[in-house]
Image (cartoon, helix red, strand yellow):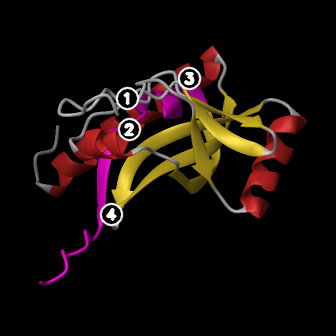
Amino acid sequence: MAPMPREKGRKVVASNKKARHDYAVLDTYEAGMALTGTEVKSLRAGRASLVDAFAQERDGELYLHSMHIPEYTQGTWTNHEPRRTRKLLLNRAEIDKLLGKTREGGYTIVPLQVYFSDGWAKVEIALAKGKKSYDKRQDLAKRDADREIARVSGRRGKGMDD
C-alpha cells in the first residue's frame, strides 16, 4: 500500500484582520498548537475564529485564550470544547524573548492567523503594542492617500490624464 501524500504549502484557515488595525505589530513568530483530533478536523474544514483571541503566560509557557474552533460535526463524545485554552509550541529562546518584552510593559501577544503549513496546524503570533485612536486615524488617512496616488498614477500610465 502506498503512503498518503503529504500536504504541501500553506493553507490559511482564519485571519485576525482587526489585529493590525488595533495594534502596531513589531515582530511575528510561527508557533505550533497542542490540539485534539476533532479540533484538527474542524480546522481542516476551514472553521475557526480569532476574534478576541490573545496569548498569555502561565508557568513559563504561552497559552492561546479565546480562540474559537467550533465542535466537529461528525464528532461524538470525544468532541472538544470550542473556546478552550490551547498551549502554544515555541522554542524556549522565543518564549523567553516574548515574555521579556511583555513584562516590560505596553506589549501584548496577539494571533494574526491560523493556517496549515505542510500539513501541520500553525498560528502566526505577533508581539504588538496597542494603538491609540489618533494613530488609527493617521493610518487610515495614509492608506487612503496611498490608494489615491496609486489610482492617479495608474490612470496616467494608461494615458487617461484628468
What distance separates the C-alpha of mark 3 from that of mark 4? 36 Å
Residue 7 belongs to the span the image colors magenta: yes
Residue 97 at what x, y percent from top left?
A: 80, 54
Q: Read off the residue under disc 2.
A: 15
Spot occupied by residue 158 in the image (x, y as percentages of width and height): 11, 54
| Discs 1, 4 touching: Cβ within 8 Å | no
Residue type at mark 2: give it: Ser
Q: Earlier in the sequence, mark 2 or mark 3?
A: 2
Identify which amino acid the numbered label 4 is placed on: Gly
Q: Label 2, label 4: how many angstroms apart (C-alpha)?
A: 18 Å
- Which mark lies nearer to you, 1 or 2? 1
- On the image, numbered disc 3 is attached to which residue? 136
Task: Give the image location of residue 114, x and y in percent.
Answer: 41, 45
Q: Residue drawn at (26%, 49%), measured in percent from left and top?
A: 153
Please give the count of numbered marks on the rendered protein: 4
From the viewer's perspective, tell me whether residue 162 is left or right of residue 111.
left
Label 2: few (<14), some or many (≥20) within 10 Å?
some
Tell me the number on the disc at residue 49: 1
Q: Would residue 114 be found to the left or right of residue 106 on screen?
A: left
Magenta-highlighted residues: 1-23
Which mark is in front, 2 or 4? 4
Mark 2 and mark 1 in contact (Cβ < 8 Å)? no
**Cα–Cα span, label 1 and label 4:** 19 Å
Q: Earlier in the sequence, mark 3 or mark 4?
A: 4
Label number found at residue 119: 4
Q: Nearer the viewer, residue 116 or 42?
A: 42
Q: Percent from the top left, x then y, of residue 34?
A: 52, 48
Residue at the spot 73% in from the left edge and 58% down from the top edge:
94
In this image, 140 relative to 79: left or right? Answer: right
- Camera-nearest residue between 80 and 149: 80
Name above or below for residue 10 compared with residue 102.
Answer: below
Q: Neighbour class for label 4 at 10 Å: few (<14), some, many (≥20)?
A: some
